[in-house]
Amino acid sequence: MLIFVKPRIVLLSVPKTGTTALEQALSERAEIAFRGRPEIKHLNLRQYINKIRPLLQPLGKPRFETVAVMREPLDWLGSWYRFRARDGLIGQPNSTAHLSFSRFAQDYLQPGERPSHARLGRQSEFLIDNDDRIAVDHIFRYEAMPALVDFLATRLGQAITLPRVNVSPEAATDLDAETETRLRAALAPEYAIWEQARQAP
């Protein structure tokens, strides 16, 4: 999470949505930067509302606007699958190196306790307030990253060049038809948010 005081912007860090590149490009410009450990870097909207926003209240108005990125849901899962297939995780319970993407997706759809490699939440969990409403002010599609960069460049008053970092290894992410149908149905609420996400500055 990056907080920019003068432009009144809070940039949330939804995992696997290009936030590492945004952090590297913009953290020096931010007055407040939560980074490093995942539980610090990836604070969600509820944590911001409950713990961070009260600390900003003495700064007065205008209020801070929240910004986040959301990735196409199947692509987001594929990114996690590739990330957990990297060499450094081989032999660990959360490694996907020995699994097909279809098997990973089926395990993700499993009710109850999932295997370690499939223990993921949803992107929407980062975007909801204490009343379970999608309450981020500006949600951009990951697939329209240039629009977000233009938006931030305008608000921050500076040109932004994103580095290419934290890239997952290549891996096949083909799905059999039945698993893809089940996955799209299960992720229908995620798709509804993604469809409405911004594609222009």
Image (cartoon, rainbow, N blue to C red):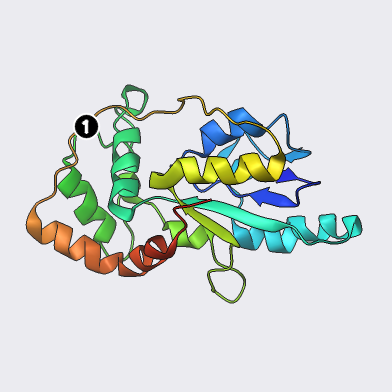
Image point (73%, 37%), residue name: 30
Above or below, 193 relative to 10:
below
Q: Position of residue 81 (x, y in %)?
A: 29, 40
Viewer-proximal residue among 17 and 98: 17
Q: Extreme bottom residue here?
A: 131
- Label 1: which secondary element: loop
Q: Position of residue 146 (x, y in %)?
A: 47, 40
Q: Residue at x 23, y 68 (%)?
A: 185
Give the residue type at disc 1: Ala
Q: Is residue 80 left or right of residue 124?
A: left
Say which of 27 and 199 sits in front. 199
Could one spot residue 77 in this view of the protein? yes
| Quadrant of image for the N terminus | top right
Please tell me in which quadrant of the rendered image residue 22 appears.
top right
The image position of residue 141, as x and y in percent, is: 43, 51
Q: Position of residue 116 (x, y in %)?
A: 34, 46
Q: In the image, is residue 120 above or below residue 87?
A: below
Q: Find disc 1 in the rendering and name its residue.
A: 171
Residue 39 visible to the viewer: no
Depth check: 86 or 26 in front? 26
> Residue at point 45% right, 25% down?
164
Residue 130 vertical position relative to residue 15 in the rendered view, above or below: below
Q: Is residue 169 left or right of residue 141?
A: left
Label 1 CA crowd tier, 10 Å (few <14, some 14–19, many 20+): some
Identify the residue at image location x=22%, y=61%.
183
